[in-house]
Image (cartoon, rainbow, N blue to C red):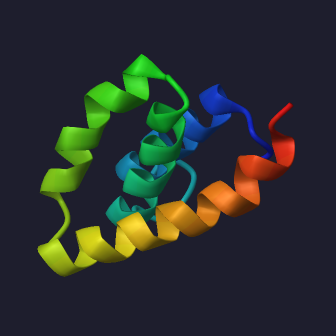
Amino acid sequence: KQGDVVSQYYLGVMYGGGIGVGQDYLTAYIWLRISGAQGNEQARSLIPEARNFLSSSALERAEQLASEYWGLYVVPFQK
């Protein structure tokens, strides 16, 4: 969560697959979106698949939360 793009990608993968955490597609999408927005191509490639698991209302909520997470977990660690 501390600004590391690769770690954010892996959080997305872990939440999407329920690896070591409860499976949560919304949270997976958020972390993939954040990592992808910072240039991680692996994350970008998984975003469309993650989006398929969300309803339109869940996707809207995920976008809102991604914006909040950006402010919490990206901005403070930017150089």
Residue at the (84%, 50%) spot, across then down: 76
On the image, which quarter does residue 62 sit in?
Answer: bottom left
Query: Relative to residue 50, is residue 65 depicted above or below?
Result: below
Query: Relative to residue 26, is residue 2 depicted above or below?
Result: above
Residue placed furthest toward the top: 41
Q: Position of residue 1 (x, y in %)?
A: 73, 49
Evaluate whether residue 20 shows in this view. Answer: yes
Q: Position of residue 51 (x, y in %)?
A: 21, 53
Residue at the (62%, 55%) spot, across then down: 70
Left or right for 25, reference 74: left
Pick the residue in front: 26 or 22. 26
On the image, which quarter does residue 32 sit in?
Answer: top left
Pick the residue in front: 33 or 79. 79
Q: Position of residue 6 (x, y in %)?
A: 62, 26
Residue at the (37%, 53%) spot, across then down: 29
Q: Position of residue 36 (x, y in %)?
A: 45, 33
Residue at the (62%, 62%) spot, across then down: 69
On the image, which quarter does residue 79 sit in?
Answer: top right
Query: Relative to residue 24, is residue 76 depicted above or below?
Result: above
